[in-house]
Amino acid sequence: MPTLHTVNKSPFERSALISALNHLRPGDALLMLEDGVVGARQGSAFASLFASAAKGCSVYVLGPDLAARGMGEKDLIQGAELVDYGGFVDLVTSHDRTQAWL
Amino acid sequence: MADVEAPQIDTSVKKKFMFINRKAPYGTIYALEALEVVLISAAFEQDVSLAFLDDGVYQLLKGQNTTGIGMKNFSPTYRALGDYAVKKVYVEKESLEERGLKAEDLMEINFEDEDDDFKEKPLIDIVGRSELTEIMAQQDVLLNF
């Protein structure tokens, strides 16, 4: 019964990413979008959290939002996967529920 | 003029809705809006529960007094949740602890258990983070506020 978690705010501004990471179950997916993409940048203060908290989970980043902020796949933490809008829809339909952390 | 048919609402479909509250009251409209939606969905006979975590736990604090800020104190409304057949109010233990709060700092919310001679029972259930995560995974719909 996997859940798709979405985070659309920067972890430097809000606690949504931390809360999402604290409530992940193995097999869940985490999609970072809008300002949330900055949380998936490698070398950031939050990058190290993913290794333990997102263990057994897939991490996705919405490509257009990343590109708009001057970043690309090479800037992301290891294991994060880029998706486009179609991929976003696929993630929603392939999970039992979506939890949009505000 | 074409006849307009009333939409057919299938009342036999019952889903598990959880409303997740993560923001303190009064600074934003989220807490009040969540409460409104909770009462509406319960009136549609859905299986409704609430979760309070992060700053959302402040919504349930006793003794809220808003006279000085000119806003309505909506906290007494939480006590009506039991009358709306809300099944459970979960409060995350770690969120309380991080904020220096204890169970006795929260208001009392009761419901009458119709399966147990209408005895008054507490609706609030303080659960750990991992237990709450499992409860969330059993829901059909998660709505965050």
Image (cartoon, coloured by chain):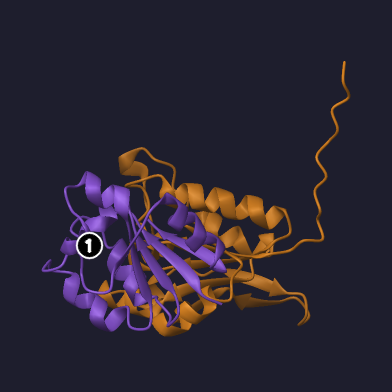
Residue displayed at 78% across by 80% down? B115
Q: Choose between B15 and B111: the one closer to the eye.
A: B15
Q: Colour of chain B?
A: orange
- The residue that appears at 51% across and 55% down in the rendered structure is B76
Amino acid type at image mark 1: Gly
Residue A56 lies left or right of residue A12; in this view the side is: right
A91 to the left or right of A17:
right
Q: Is residue B128 visible?
A: no
* Left or right: B92 in relation to B9: left
Toward the top, the furthest residue is B1
Q: Where is residue A65 in the image (x, y as percent from the top left)?
A: 29, 48
User: Quadrant location of residue B96?
Assistant: bottom left
- Label 1: chain letter: A
Please state the horizontal and vertical placement of residue A88, each as a whole percent of the image.
44, 56
Q: In which quarter of the view is residue A76 placed?
A: bottom left
Q: Give chain A's shade.
A: purple
Count of numbered tags: 1
Q: Quadrant of the N terminus of chain A?
A: bottom right
Which quadrant does the C terminus of chain A fall into? bottom left
Position of A65 with respect to B115 (left or right) is left
Please name the residue that numbered disc 1 is placed on.
A39
Query: Counting other residues with Cα less than 10 Å from the Cα at mark 1, is it few (<14), some (14-19), or many (20 or more)?
Result: many
Label 1's element?
Answer: helix
Which residue is pictured at 54% across the width and 66% down the height? A94
Q: In this view, does B94 lie above or below B5?
A: below
